[in-house]
Image (cartoon, coloured by chain):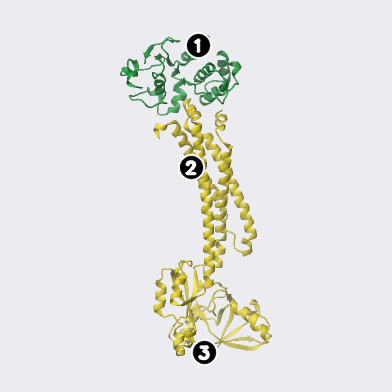
Chain colours: A green, B yellow
Amino acid sequence: MSESEIGDSDIFLKQEIVFEKPGRYLIRAQSGKGKSSVLNFIYGSNLHYDGQISYSADFELRDPVDLKQTKLSYAFQDFKLFPGLTLTENIELKNKLTHYRSREEIDGMVERVNLGHRRDSLVQKLSIGQRQRVAILRALCQPFSFLLLDEPFSHLDNENIRIMTSLIDEELKKQQAGLILTSLESSYYFDYDKILNL
Amino acid sequence: MLWKLQRKTLLPVQILGYAFTLFIGVAIILITIQFYLDLQPLLVKNTELFNKNTAVLSKQVSIVHALDGEAVDSKKTVYFTSNEIRELEEQPFIRKVALFNHARFQIRVEIDQQQMGRIGTELFFESIPDEYLDVKPESWKWDQKSNFIPIIIPEDYLQLYNFGYAQSKGLPVISKLMATSAPLKIWIEGRSKPFSGNIVGFSNKINSILVPQDFLNWANESYGISRQSSASRLLIEFTDPTDERIMRFFKARDYFINEDRLEFSKLVFIFKSALAFIFFIALTIVVLSFAFILLSINLMFEKHKETILNLYYIGYGNKQIARFYQIVISSFTGISLIAASLAGLVIRNYYVNKVINNFFIEVNRNWILLLGVIILVVLLSLYNILVVRSIRRINNPANT
């Protein structure tokens, strides 16, 4: 990020920011301000930053794979789905790793977000909105302390946003997990403990 | 699921091409090594006299030598002086020099057989250290108490007699068996009683009539006329018979060496060089196939970088991502090596039946499978390390 962008940002001005579960945090900024970068820093997939990110002891950052499988779940802005696999296969690919959900649970979630009829379609044939929902469902297929959602509803209509938020809310409560969500300035979706401006 | 995803990243042609070239390369390597080991005893056996790379060295008997001056002088010129022997010993390409010991007394040998009457002839005896003999008959020993002397004659002598002398004189031909069973009486000048003796063997290499060295030393001591010990022929042991300095040196000194004697050694050298050449070609093929598959894999990783990165993002570890590729490469490598080993065994079986058995040499141990397994283990270890490393390089560029 360039100097000018750092300007009036909450994150970059403060000495220290603590995210605590089950707290819910909104990182708000316009496009291109580095919302994704902050999530990537936290997720450990981008190491190009100054300063320090430390995790509490139970995070065991020593194993970044374990971190991704059991502590942090991330719904990426660009989805990171595999277009050559079907909707279900994309979710299964993650679930195989964590064995977190049963086949029935997955089917139930897919049904709930109105994607039951596309279950066996290749992801490359899905619309962007459908892909966005698949990416979020996939992120829910693992245990986590924090759920990272990067502009999760940007391509969804209000009805679908309502369905997704209630699904996510249930899961957060069930797992007693925290949420870090990035969004453009005007969007909220959840009740937050803290709102950070970038 | 993961496999379904990763299978699409592979190009079967590359894998098959790799497997095939590896198969060819390893098969040739295994066969050349085994062939070399199998023929080793043959090479050693045929070079029995020359297995330590030995040759008989004498001085050229030229017309000048024969006619020049007195008989004594001309004779002297065919003997090696102690200086000359020392000079030979100092040459870097000569490991050892051994002398032909010869009898310094008159010998008369008679065939003692009723039907044939008494035929006899004046003879000479020589001896060489046993280690230079190409034949070692059982009865090739002498001790002072026994009255028996074993004799080895050149096989050529028998041939000469059978096909030359006997034919023209209308005499019966003599088989090896007959020759060895004929009892001989050996008279030595100065001894009232004859020794008994037998031809016990035929040499292809040493062109002389040989008796055990122990006997000749003792007899020279007891009956020798002259004290002077001189050698007209030497046994030379080379460090490397293919050394080109050998011929140059002998030519310069006007020494005579039967070049044929070195021919086989040259042949062996050429044979070994050819095998080594083939071996290195095959080794190159294997190395190239190894490099090729690594390159293909790395290019493929580059091409499907996004898939690999995405897998890593959603929580797959480097090893988990690498496993599919490791298994595929390992399987194809394994199949290649099994096929190469089988091909090696089949071809070996073929040449053992066709070639080796004709030479009546003992068949060497079969190393093909062991070697195959060793190559397999080495290749698999390398692949498994390198594939993970490549994946890691994609997912954690900062750490590498």
Q: How far apart are marks 2 and 1 (CA)?
A: 50 Å
Q: Which of B394 and A15 is in front in this view?
A: B394
Mark 3 lies on residue? B189
Mark 1 lies on residue? A161
Q: Which of B387 and B139 is in front in this view?
A: B387
Q: Are marks 1 and 3 on the same chain?
A: no
Q: Which residue is drawn at 56% across and 39% down?
A: B14
Instruction: Name the element at disc 3.
Output: loop
Mark 2 lies on residue? B382
Residue A58 in view, yes or no: no
Q: What residue type is labelled 1?
A: Ile
Mark before the other along the chain sequence, 3 or 2: 3
- Label 2 crowding class (10 Å Cα cut-off): few <14, some 14-19, many 20+? few
Q: Is residue A152 left or right of residue B5?
A: left
Q: Which of B121 and A148 is in front in this view?
A: A148
Q: In this view, does B52 lie above or below B283?
A: below
Of tags 3 and 2, the one toward the viewer is 2
Instruction: Name the element at disc 1.
Output: helix
Of tags 1 and 3, the one toward the viewer is 1
Q: How far apart are marks 1 and 3 (CA)?
A: 128 Å
Q: Which amino acid does label 2 sit on?
A: Leu
Q: Position of residue B370 (x, y in %)?
A: 55, 50
Residue B26 in view, yes or no: yes
Q: Position of residue A96 (x, y in %)?
A: 54, 25
Q: Which chain carries label 3?
A: B
Q: Which amino acid does label 3 sit on?
A: Glu
